[in-house]
Amino acid sequence: MHRYHAGRTAGGGAVVACLLLAAGQTGCRQAQPGPKADNAVARPEPPARAVQPREEPPCPALDPTALLAPDPEQWLTAESLREGAEGGWVTGSFDPRRNKLDIRTNDVTAFALDTGRLPIDWRQLVVLSIDGSNSELRRRERSIYRFQREESGGWTVREE
């Protein structure tokens, strides 16, 4: 089974992105060094630093203009944050076997979904779940859907 994952976060003048690779994973991991070659020169290890515990591991920082020119592989993009929020995120997955999109948000008031980057079968029911609320996604002429949070807390597709 293939799952397609996407994520985008924003905050404090910097845009940060994490790609969720599994449903149970909650953050980014730092790269681990590979095995040393036999002819490698031994170097002394740097002194260990005290590490403060964090609730979530840090994600790699990206260019702040990423919201203006999103990654062409990205199918889900945060477009605006809740007023006064220091940061926010939108993340999602697509299960082609169930033809279901599952999107989660935090402190985001608008996001874009590019269905042209997913293998959606439009001949079948397409289930869209945003923050746990399910609905049917219907095909439109354009592949990009722009969602806006309503005052009631629900989401609506913006007409363009």
Image (tube, grey):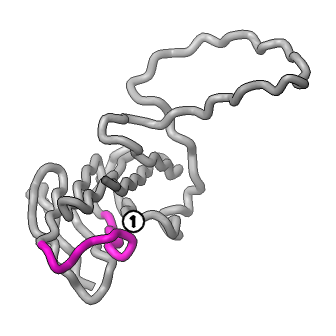
Q: Which residues are magenta?
A: 111-124
**At which x and y percent is residue 58?**
50, 34
For the point 46% across and 30% down, which residue is it? 57
Residue at 36% over, 47% down: 88
Amino acid type indicated by mark 1: Trp
The residue under the point 16% across, 69% down is 126
Image x and y of residue 14, in percent: 53, 50
Disc tally is 1
Q: Is residue 47 left or right of residue 15?
A: right
**Does the magenta portion include 118?**
yes
Q: Give the labeled residue for mark 1.
A: 75
Tag 1: Cα neighbours inside 10 Å, few (<14), some, or many (≥20)?
many
- Residue 63, picture quadrant: bottom right
Q: The C terminus is located in which quarter?
A: bottom left
Q: Is residue 54 above or below residue 83?
A: above
Q: Nearer the viewer, residue 6 or 48?
A: 6
When the figure is inspected, residue 5 is found, relative to residue 138, above or below; the finding is above
Image coordinates of residue 60 in percent, x first then y, are: 56, 42
Q: Is residue 60 magenta?
A: no
For image coordinates 36% across by 76% down, the residue present is 116
In the image, is 9 to the left or to the right of 35?
Answer: left
Is residue 149 shown above or below 30?
below
- Residue 33 image offset from top left, x and y in percent: 68, 29
Q: Which residue is nearer to you in this view: 108 or 41?
A: 41
In this view, 36 is above or below 5: above
